[in-house]
């Protein structure tokens, strides 16, 4: 941060741009935005998963995942990623394919109606068997860090633990703060019910 401040002063960046640069750098540092995967790549999977359980406990401690046992959380933890975004960035465009379940870790995202998704807000879609598209454009306000769980990875874990999958979908309606593809929920509940019934 000190080097960034010196750089800003030396090159006399305007105040609005300076603020955005400082905010982005702060969020990047706070969110392990230093590519923690590179730092941890030599750890064995068991230790790596424990580190991820600690780093991403915010999303994994949500009621949606609490019914899952230690094996479920361990598998999920391996697939959570973190991303940092600058003020004014568009996190997702209307009509864009949705590929993950997201939770705001810090900062905020603004919905088209002006409402904000702040820290702890869980949003995304559950349409994992075809290409879901977002009905909203979400814009970053003041810098934002987001934890994301790939829908593809989530589907694999649901297939491995079908009984937990049923509980997962029952809890979905209560724990999701914003569904950017709301019409898909019934489709997935029916789809997963059919798949578990055949097991």
Image (cartoon, helix red, strand yellow):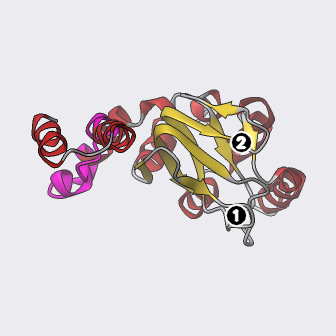
In space, the residues marked 2 and 1 are separated at their CA atoms by: 23 Å
Boundaries of the magenta span: 26-47
Q: Specify whether residue 39 is painted magenta.
A: yes
Is the residue marked by circle 2 packed among few (<14), some (14-19), or many (20+) residues within 10 Å? Answer: some
Give the left or right position of residue 6, taking residue 145 as reference.
left
Extreme residue toward the bottom, this view: 130
Q: Which one is nearer the viewer's eye here, 105 or 48?
A: 105
Q: Which element carries disc 1, helix, strand or loop?
A: loop
- Kindly indicate the quadrant of the structure image that contains residue 109: top right
Q: Which one is nearer the viewer's eye here, 189 or 39?
A: 39
| Residue 176 shows in the view | yes
Give the left or right position of residue 41, taking residue 14 as reference.
left
Give the left or right position of residue 77, taking residue 164 as reference.
left
Q: Which residue is mark 2?
A: 111
| Quadrant occupied by the C terminus | bottom right
Q: Please report the residue visible at 19 percent of the width from the left and 51 percent of the height from the top.
A: 40
| Residue 69 shows in the view | no
Q: Which one is nearer the viewer's eye here, 47 or 56?
A: 56
Q: Which element carries disc 2, helix, strand or loop?
A: loop
Is the residue marked by circle 1 packed among few (<14), some (14-19), or many (20+) residues within 10 Å? Answer: some
């Amino acid at each position: 941060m000190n080097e960034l401040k010196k750089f800003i002063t030396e090159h006399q960046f305007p105040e609005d741009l300076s603020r955005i640069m400082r905010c982005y750098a702060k969020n990047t540092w706070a969110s392990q935005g230093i590519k923690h995967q590179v730092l941890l790549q030599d750890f064995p999977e068991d230790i790596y998963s424990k580190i991820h359980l600690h780093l991403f406990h915010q999303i994994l401690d949500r009621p949606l995942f609490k019914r899952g046992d230690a094996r479920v959380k361990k598998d999920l933890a391996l697939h959570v990623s973190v991303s940092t975004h600058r003020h004014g960035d568009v996190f997702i465009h209307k009509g864009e394919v949705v590929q993950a379940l997201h939770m705001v870790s810090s900062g905020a995202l603004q919905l088209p109606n002006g409402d904000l998704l702040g820290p702890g807000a869980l949003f995304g879609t559950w349409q994992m068997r075809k290409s879901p598209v977002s009905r909203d454009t979400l814009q970053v306000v003041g810098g934002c860090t987001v934890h994301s769980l790939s829908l593809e990875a989530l589907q694999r874990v649901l297939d491995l633990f079908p009984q937990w999958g049923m509980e997962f979908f029952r809890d979905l309606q209560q724990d999701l703060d914003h569904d950017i593809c709301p019409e898909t929920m019934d489709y997935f509940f029916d789809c997963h019910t059919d798949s578990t019934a055949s097991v």
